[in-house]
Structure formats: C-alpha cells, structure tokens
C-alpha cells in the first residue's frame, strides 16, 4: 500500500509505503503518528501514488496544465529507454572494445581504492606501525605521502587509534 501524505508544519508532500506507526517529514523532519497524517490518496500502485504527488506539486506551482500534457511515469520510462544508445554501441563509439570489457567483468578481479589498501594494511599487519603500513601500501601502488596523510585522518576522525606507534582500526 502507498499513500501520498502531507506535513501540516511545512506542507511538504511525499509517498509512504506500507503502514508505519510513525512517519517523518523529509523536509522539516517533524515526526508524528502516521495515522494522524492526512492521506491524500491510498493505492496499491507505487507509480500511481508518485503521479498523484507530482500532479499535486505541479498544481501548487501553477504548472498543472503542463503536467497534464505529460505521459505517465511508465510512458516516460519507456521514452527514456528508447532515447539512449545501448552500452555496447556507447563503448564502441568511445573506442573501447565491448568484448574486452565483458571479459574483465567476468574475471571477477576487483581493484581496491587507496583508502581500502591503507585500511587493509592496518587491519592485517601484525605490527601496524606507520613504516610497515607505508611499505605495504607502496607495494600496492599507494604513494607514501598519501598513506601518511590517510593514517593521520583515520586517527583524527576517530576511525583508528595510534598507541605506542601502532595503528588499530576502531
């Protein structure tokens, strides 16, 4: 079940799915018992609820007639899908071989970000001193300056601690 509900504080409109005990306004944050909220429409179709909300917003802003000329969300989705080019054509026109991309995706190889490499070093090394973490990260292509800066930020943000020269993720 979907309902289009409104906030009596800021007049925002939104769609609520299901029947929650409380609901909160996404604009002003005011929460209240859901059954006390005014439901403008109740429907089993989520697209219908979104269309009603969009229609109400368009009418509020003086664009009701323009909104009425638009198709349904489902029709607009079809138009968007038909308007673009497929992935294979896009890759080919960008000078990339689609088969190579498909093979790379099937190989299951994943690359880690620099931050992930630093975190992994702190987590996995027996003695996670700055020198050892930097060395580990450099072996994986992360510059030492980046690693040193990342370690400082991890400590500053409380994501890691440094005690007697050793780092530990919290």
Image (tube, rainbow, N blue to C red):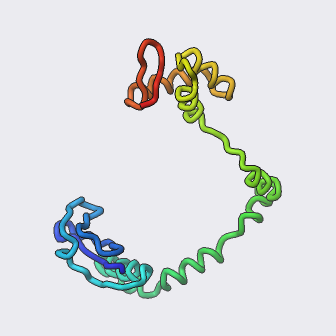
Q: Nearer the viewer, residue 53 or 132?
A: 132
Residue 4 appears in the picture as rendered: yes
Quadrant containing the C terminus in the rendered view: top left
Picture residue at 65% right of the left edge, 77% below the top: 82
Quadrant containing the N terminus in the rendered view: bottom left
Find residue 46 and report its horizontal and vertical position in percent.
42, 79
- For the view shown, which residue lies furthest in the front direction? 126
- For the view shown, which residue lies furthest in the top direction? 164
Picture residue at 30% right of the left edge, 62% below the top: 26
Q: Nearer the viewer, residue 156 or 96?
A: 156
* Label total for image: 0
Is 55 drawn above or below residue 136 in the view shown? below
Find residue 60 and report its horizontal and vertical position in percent.
28, 78
Is 154 drawn above or below residue 50 in the view shown? above
Picture residue at 23% right of the left edge, 67% below the top: 22
Location of residue 135 by image quarter: top right
Find residue 66 and report its horizontal and vertical position in percent.
42, 83
Is 168 displayed left or right of 57 in the figure?
A: right
Is 128 displayed left or right of 23 in the figure?
A: right
Picture residue at 63% right of the left edge, 39% below the top: 112
Q: Nearer the viewer, residue 143 or 118?
A: 118
Residue 96 appears in the picture as rendered: no
Find residue 111 and report its horizontal and vertical position in percent.
66, 41
């Amino acid at each position: 079940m979907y309902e289009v509900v409104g906030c009596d504080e800021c007049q925002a409109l939104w769609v609520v799915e299901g029947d929650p005990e409380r609901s909160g306004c996404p604009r002003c944050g005011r929460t209240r018992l859901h059954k006390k909220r005014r439901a403008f429409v109740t429907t089993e179709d989520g697209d219908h609820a979104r269309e009603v909300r969009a229609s109400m917003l368009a009418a509020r802003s003086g664009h009701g007639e323009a909104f009425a000329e638009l198709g349904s969300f489902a029709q607009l989705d079809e138009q968007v899908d038909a308007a673009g080019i497929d992935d294979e054509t896009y890759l080919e026109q960008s000078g990339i071989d689609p088969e190579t991309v498909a093979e790379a995706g099937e190989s299951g190889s994943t690359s880690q970000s620099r931050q992930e490499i630093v975190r992994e070093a702190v987590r996995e090394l027996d003695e996670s001193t700055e020198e050892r973490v930097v060395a580990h990260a450099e072996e994986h292509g992360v510059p030492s300056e980046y690693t040193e800066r990342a370690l400082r930020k991890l400590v500053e943000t409380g994501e890691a601690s440094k005690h007697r020269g050793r780092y530990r993720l919290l």
